[in-house]
Amino acid sequence: MTNLQQRIEEQVGSFVRNVSELIRRAAIDALEHAVVVPGVGAGVGGDQPKRPGTRGAKRQPRSAKKPAAPREPAEMAVLTERLYEAIASHPGETMEVLAPAVGCPSKHLRVSIDQLLTQERVKKAGEKRSTRYFPMGAEGQ
């Protein structure tokens, strides 16, 4: 083999190795993006996936999130009544205290508390996380 042929084979071999490495990395990146589990171990290459809510964390676009299925009116009425009973038995408590008494997360009670406030069965004092709820006619506000 001549020197020229040897150099050509080395260059072609190097090119093939580089292309193969690029393809391998692209495949790994595609798999990581397809099955990312936030906060679980180190990713390929030692990269730590970002936890939601931290700097640099990629958030899912709103359009990609599926909205919750609407609840049936009967189910909402039962949930609203359970919330009212919890407020009546624990007047002056926050939603974070009332939600476990109702048996569901506080974010699921937003519609129910709005209904109770609109119907003037409940009154509130405070703002945001320090909002406290009272049954109408209850003293201590």
Image (cartoon, helix red, strand yellow):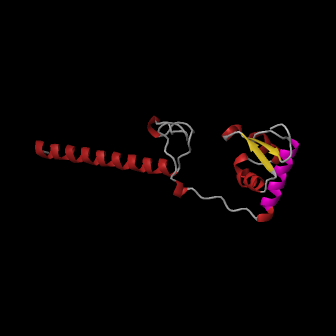
Q: Is residue 52 above or below residue 83?
A: above
Residue shown at 86% from the left, 43% from the top: 138
Residue 27 drawn at (x, y percent): 42, 50
Q: In which quadrant is the N terminus drawn?
A: top left
In the rendered image, which quarter contains the C terminus?
top right
Q: Residue furthest toward the right?
A: 89
x and y percentages locating residue 18 in the rendered image: 29, 45
**Magenta segment boundaries in residue numbering:** 75-89
| Secondary structure mostly seen in the magenta stretch | helix
> Going by the image, does 49 lie left or right of 3?
right
At a point 65% along the width and 58% down the height, the residue shown is 68
Frontmost residue, 55 versus 85: 85
Q: Determine whether, in the image, residue 113 is placed left or right of residue 49.
A: right
Image quadrant where residue 116 sits: bottom right
Q: Is residue 82 magenta?
A: yes
Task: Work out whether residue 128 or residue 7 is closer to the camera in this orientation and state it.
Answer: 128
Examine the structure image and report whether residue 121 is included in the region drawn in magenta.
no
Question: In the rendered view, does 7 fall on the left or right side of 139?
Answer: left
Residue 2 visible, this angle:
no
At a point 34% along the width and 45% down the height, the residue shown is: 21
